[in-house]
């Protein structure tokens, strides 16, 4: 080939290459491969596209999607059409889970367990930024004084947490006193221990292990203490005290602040036995105006008699429409409950309380003027009737033990014979729960308690029918 032709071709090629170098664009991307956390946001790190004489940035087309909610490898392509071909650059994005699961223990990380007992697993939960339901994947490794919880997610991220088990009884037993604290009793009376219970988290029932000590002298007025103490097998000890006040018994008699606690509408299986328990513990005698609801409860009438209370008569049926429809029906009802009491206890009681009291107006619905006749006729037949001048209102507006208590103590006076109306019908817990506080108030404020007898001065309402 002619030398001149070769030189010419070389010059043309050089020129063409120069043209290409000057005008051919190129794409440059930052970070051709990156790794990001699952559920994070993907942001393009940028690119350039230009030649030596022109910027082609706006001509680039980006293709490809990155789903950051799913682990995987994704590609994003940067494409620039030029002349008869397309320039392409590819970025690789790895979406991966690099976060460890979290184990949350139920209960404490340090747990005290009774000596000789086995720790009962309180459970745990596992949360992870990607994987679900890892609770069943937990490996539980039990050692002598530790439990190790270990879990691995599908990406290999591993978490370990430890629960320390301390085999030691660090809690003191608990002593719960029955009855009232403080208690007040009269000088010369007998102290009846109301009782107590003792429990321990490790040893269970320790009531039989309780030691009771006191300096009580019921023949001398003053304030005394009864101490209850108990130790568990680990040496943890608890002591509690009950304060006993021994006071002089006020002089009994009319106008000296005597309190006559009376209970209508019993006996009942749920309330009467507990009322009798309290009266026995407190050394109090009361009066029960009873009904003839059920012979199955006659054992309570016998108990009332044996424990020295007055059994008085209220009504056999407590059916106003029957009792007050005629004088005949009233006395049939009255003699029925009198015979019921006599058959159960051997006592012929003549102390009565009219259903609704002598001042009731409900009787007007059934027989006009019947109360005027009955209040006179019962006396002619040898009965003595008693109403009340202190009303607990436990069969009326009083709905709580506090209301019952306040109604009674606000009605008491040292200048009268206080006959208190209460009820021992089924489930009357408000009166039951107020009773011991009422007795304590009376003792602490110089009152004495007594039961109604035939010599008790009568308290009677004005007749309204």
Image: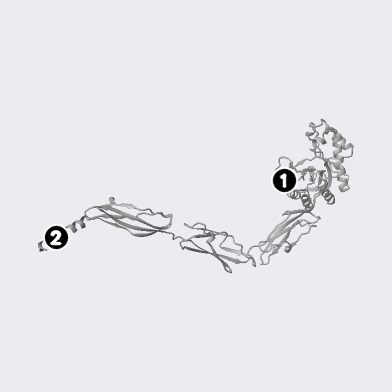
- Residue 465 in sight: no
Task: Name the residue: 70% across, 57% down.
Answer: 176
Q: Residue furthest bottom?
A: 144
- 68 and 191: which one is in front? 68
Q: Is residue 307 left or right of residue 244?
A: right
Of labels 2 and 1, the one closer to you: 2
Residue 163 falls in which quadrant of the image? bottom right
Q: Residue at x 78, y 52 (%)?
A: 277
Answer whether labels 2 and 1 touch (C-beta < 8 Å): no
**In the image, 412: left or right of 112?**
right
Q: Which residue is mark 1?
A: 405
The secondary element bearing badge 1 is classed as helix
Query: x, y (%) of residue 155?
Result: 45, 61
The local crowd at label 2, few if under 14, some if 14 to 19, many if 20 or more residues have their Cα within 10 Å, is few
For residue 9, which numbered disc appears in the image?
A: 2
> Of label 2 and label 1, which has the lower sequence position?
2
> In the rendered image of this protein, does residue 285 appear above or below residue 459?
below
Q: How many marks?
A: 2
Residue visible at 19% across and 59% down in the picture: 17
Image coords of residue 239 (percent x, y) = 69, 61
Q: Please say if 148 is above or below 251.
A: below
Q: Is residue 390 visible?
A: yes
Residue 254, position in %: x, y? 82, 44
Query: From the viewer's perspective, is 389 left or right of 63?
Result: right
CA neighbours of label 1 inside 10 A, class few (<14), some (14 to 19), many (20+):
many
Q: Quadrant of residue 227?
A: bottom right
Q: Nearer the viewer, residue 317 or 444?
A: 317
**Residue 122, position in %: x, y?**
59, 60
Label of residue 133 in the image? none
Quadrant in the picture for the N terminus: bottom left
Please give left or right for residue 272 compared with residue 162 in the image.
Answer: right
Q: Nearer the viewer, residue 39 or 74?
A: 74
């Amino acid at each position: 080939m002619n030398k001149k032709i070769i030189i010419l071709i070389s010059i043309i090629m050089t020129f063409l290459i120069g043209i290409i170098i000057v005008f051919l664009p190129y794409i440059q991307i930052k970070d051709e491969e990156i790794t990001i956390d699952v559920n994070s946001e993907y942001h393009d790190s940028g690119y350039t596209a230009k030649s030596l004489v022109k910027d082609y940035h706006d001509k680039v087309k980006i293709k490809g999607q990155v789903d950051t909610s799913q682990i995987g490898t994704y590609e994003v392509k940067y494409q620039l059409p030029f002349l008869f071909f397309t320039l392409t650059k590819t970025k690789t994005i790895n979406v991966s889970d690099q976060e460890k699961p979290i184990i949350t223990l139920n209960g404490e990380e340090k747990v005290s367990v009774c000596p000789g007992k086995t720790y009962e697993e309180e459970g745990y939960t596992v949360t992870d930024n990607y994987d679900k339901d890892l609770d069943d994947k937990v490996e539980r490794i039990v050692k002598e004084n530790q439990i190790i919880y270990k879990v691995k997610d599908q990406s290999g991220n591993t978490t370990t947490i430890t629960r320390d088990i301390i085999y030691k009884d660090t809690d003191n037993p608990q002593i719960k006193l029955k009855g009232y604290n403080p208690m007040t009793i009269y000088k010369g009376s007998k102290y009846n221990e109301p009782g107590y219970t003792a429990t321990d988290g490790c040893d269970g029932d320790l009531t039989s292990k309780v030691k009771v000590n006191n300096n009580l002298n019921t023949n001398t007025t003053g304030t005394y203490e009864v101490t209850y103490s108990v130790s568990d097998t680990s040496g943890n000890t608890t002591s509690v005290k009950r304060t006993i006040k021994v006071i002089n018994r006020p002089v009994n008699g009319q106008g000296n602040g005597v309190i006559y606690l009376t209970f209508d509408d019993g006996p009942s299986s749920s309330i009467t036995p507990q009322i009798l328990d309290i009266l026995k513990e407190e050394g109090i005698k009361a009066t029960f105006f009873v009904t003839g609801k059920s012979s199955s409860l006659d054992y309570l009438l016998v108990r009332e008699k044996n424990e020295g209370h007055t059994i008085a008569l209220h009504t056999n049926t407590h059916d106003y429409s029957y009792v007050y429809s005629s004088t005949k029906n009233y006395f049939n009802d009255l003699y029925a409950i009198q015979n019921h009491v006599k058959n159960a206890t051997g006592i012929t009681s003549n102390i009565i309380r009219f259903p609704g009291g002598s001042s009731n107006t409900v009787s007007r619905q059934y027989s006009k003027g019947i109360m005027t006749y009955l209040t006179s006729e019962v006396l002619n037949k040898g009965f003595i009737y008693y109403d009340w001048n202190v009303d607990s209102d436990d069969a009326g507006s009083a709905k709580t033990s506090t209301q019952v208590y306040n109604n009674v103590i606000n009605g008491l006076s040292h200048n009268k014979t206080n006959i208190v109306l209460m009820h021992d019908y089924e489930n009357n817990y408000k009166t039951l729960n107020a009773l011991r506080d009422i007795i304590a108030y009376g003792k602490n404020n110089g009152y004495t308690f007594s039961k109604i007898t035939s010599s008790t001065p009568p308290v009677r309402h004005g007749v309204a029918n």
